[in-house]
Image (cartoon, rainbow, N blue to C red):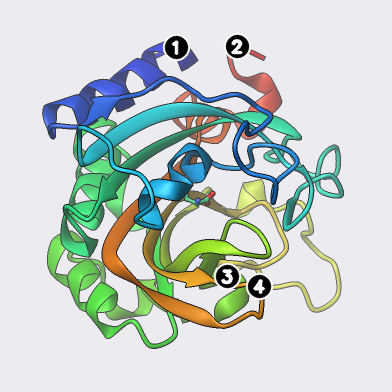
């Protein structure tokens, strides 16, 4: 599959799950003074999550152009040092606006990766937020992953926030083990290849955010009236995986 086929295949898969495909929004958010650039697919839906705007559909999917060069999600320091971060990239995503929640988000992500795209189940890992027993149980039931490949992490890794304020919540990530040959820190003293470690062997493929709070100016978390789903998967990264190359810079559309 080319990168364009992969984008199409993602959007088609979620169309079959009754999602409305929406266009990538502007890289400069037009109605959000809290962000300089669009840093995730959910930015155009911020007011929907906050209950301040209603859309004629409750499920959406898109491939959003993103820039991560400033603010909370700033990848500038990683670009050029590893082979899988970019300042500018596309993020594939699916959303539920008060519609489905954790079970469907996990089920569809797992089905798309393993059945549609054929990724090997024994190379995939899932992570959940510290106290998210529900997501952990769902992962075990839906994917059949053994307990040692469903790991818990804290706020830094498994609680996603768009910026200093705004919709946020615990998240669950899917990581891929690309094998020992993908490690770029081999032989360094004390180095251990691991999920959320510091080498290129395990890479995060997809982030499933369970949006249930609004982070307010005073840093307090306010429970939102409805629960939502916001997922994001870098198109360049999944394309490298499906095209069987270790560097995003070796995919067909770079
Ligand atoms: N908003 C989350 C992220 O950017 C999931 O789409 O990772």
Tag 4 or tag 3, which sits nearer the N-term? 3
Give the number of the disc on residue 65: none
Residue 59 vs residue 7: left or right? left
Residue 139 percent coordinates (x, y): 24, 67
Give the number of the disc on residue 217: 4
Q: Quadrant of the N terminus?
A: top left
Do the residues under discs 2 and 1 have CB atoms within 8 angstroms?
yes
Tag 1 or tag 2, which sits nearer the N-term? 1
Mark 4 neighbour density, 10 Å: few (under 14) some (14–19) many (20 or more): few
Tag 4 or tag 1, which sits nearer the N-term? 1
Mark 3 residue element: helix
Residue named by callout 2: 253
- For ligand 1, tell me if the residue under mark 4 lies within 8 Å: no
Tag 2 or tag 3, which sits nearer the N-term? 3
Do the residues under discs 3 and 4 have CB atoms within 8 angstroms?
no
Mark 3 neighbour density, 10 Å: few (under 14) some (14–19) many (20 or more): some
Residue named by callout 3: 157
Of badges 2 and 4, nearer the viewer stands 4
Do the residues under discs 3 and 2 have CB atoms within 8 angstroms?
no
Give the spatial CA distance, label 3 vs label 4.
22 Å
Viewer-closest of 239 and 90: 90
Tag 1 or tag 3, which sits nearer the N-term? 1
Residue named by callout 1: 4
Give the spatial CA distance, label 2 vs label 1.
8 Å
Q: Quadrant of the C terminus?
A: top right
Res. 119 visible in picture: yes
Mark 1 neighbour density, 10 Å: few (under 14) some (14–19) many (20 or more): few
Res. 2 visible in picture: no
User: Who's the residue at 23% across and 63% down the image?
Assistant: 102
Give the spatial CA distance, label 2 vs label 4.
40 Å
């Amino acid at each position: 599959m080319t990168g364009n086929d992969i984008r199409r295949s993602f959007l088609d898969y979620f169309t079959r799950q009754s999602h409305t495909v929406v266009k990538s929004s502007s890289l400069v958010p037009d109605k959000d003074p809290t962000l300089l650039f669009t840093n995730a697919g959910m930015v155009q839906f911020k007011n929907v999550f906050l209950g301040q705007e209603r859309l004629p559909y409750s499920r959406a999917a898109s491939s959003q152009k993103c820039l991560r060069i400033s603010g909370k999600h700033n990848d500038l320091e990683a670009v050029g040092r590893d082979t899988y971060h970019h300042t500018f990239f596309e993020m594939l995503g699916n959303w539920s606006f008060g519609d489905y929640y954790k079970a469907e988000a996990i089920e569809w992500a797992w089905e798309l990766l393993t059945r549609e795209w054929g990724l090997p189940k024994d190379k995939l890992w899932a992570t959940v937020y510290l106290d998210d027993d529900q997501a952990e149980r769902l992962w075990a039931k839906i994917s059949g992953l053994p307990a040692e490949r469903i790991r818990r992490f804290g706020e830094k890794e498994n609680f996603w926030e768009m910026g200093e304020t705004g919709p946020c919540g615990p998240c669950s990530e899917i990581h891929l083990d690309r094998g020992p040959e993908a490690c770029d820190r081999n032989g360094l003293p004390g180095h251990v290849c691991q999920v959320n470690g510091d080498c290129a062997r395990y890479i995060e493929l997809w982030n499933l955010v369970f949006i249930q709070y609004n982070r307010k100016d005073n840093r307090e978390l306010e429970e939102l009236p409805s629960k939502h789903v916001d997922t994001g998967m870098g198109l360049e990264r999944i394309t490298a995986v499906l095209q069987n190359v270790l560097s995003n810079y070796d995919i067909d559309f770079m």
